[in-house]
Amino acid sequence: MTSRVLLVSPATTASLRRAAFDDGDRLDTAGAARARAAAGSLTVPAAVVTSPSVRCRETARALGLDAGDAPPELAGLDAGRWRGRTLEEVSAADPEAVARWLADPRTAAPGGESVAAVCERVAHWLDALRPAGRVVAVVEPEVVRAAAVHATGAPDAAFWRFDVPPLTCTELSGRTGRWNVRLGGPLAAA
């Protein structure tokens, strides 16, 4: 049986608008309004899960989804000491660390985790899915990237090649070992 996983990225927050590493902030007014306007645009799922972040749980609620679990495998990238700061800010403070982190998926942010670690745990979650019909997962953009890396069989270095705008949906269909990817577009107002 085929599984369908709809990966929905969160609506906008102040840190997302600043292109800062997530610092746990809530949806901004415009992001919450866009998510509420898109409520009902997704086919009724068999299950709803989220990343454990505030913005993903708030996006799910605004979309009218009753989110169940927040599996730890679906957490966003732990940016460690870079949390809440922009890439420009951390690059100015420690350009060598940023260059290593961007060039090598196995290099972790100081006090955080590596892109390879995110890709591994998201792949594990996807591979453990049992056919359950349509699953909607409201997840951090880096979780969508990691899922796309796994589904396409791309190397972890391809992680940065996937752009995930706010409040978009990417669909994976298939099963362990063979996934198809339907690249997403914005959720439309219902």
Image: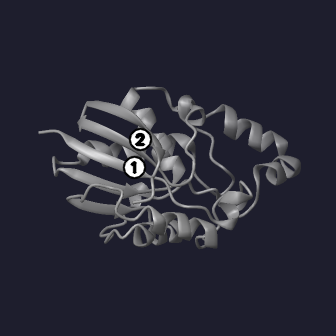
Residue 71: percent from the left, percent from the top?
Answer: 35, 62
State the residue at coordinates (54%, 61%): 11
Query: Which quadrant of the figure contains the C terminus?
Result: bottom left
Residue type highlighted by circle 1: Leu
Label 1 SS: strand
* Location of residue 171 by image quarter: top left
- Which of pointers 1 and 2 lies earlier in the amino acid sequence? 1
State the residue at coordinates (37%, 66%): 70
State the residue at coordinates (58%, 57%): 78
Query: Which quadrant of the figure contains the N terminus?
Result: top left
In the image, is residue 38 above or below residue 168?
A: below
Residue labelled with disc 1: 7
State the residue at coordinates (31%, 67%): 69
In the image, is residue 163 above or below residue 132?
A: above
Residue 185: percent from the left, percent from the top?
Answer: 47, 43
Residue type highlighted by circle 2: Ala
The one nearer the camera, 54 or 74, is 54
Do callouts 1 and 2 mark residues in contact (Cβ within 8 Å)?
A: yes
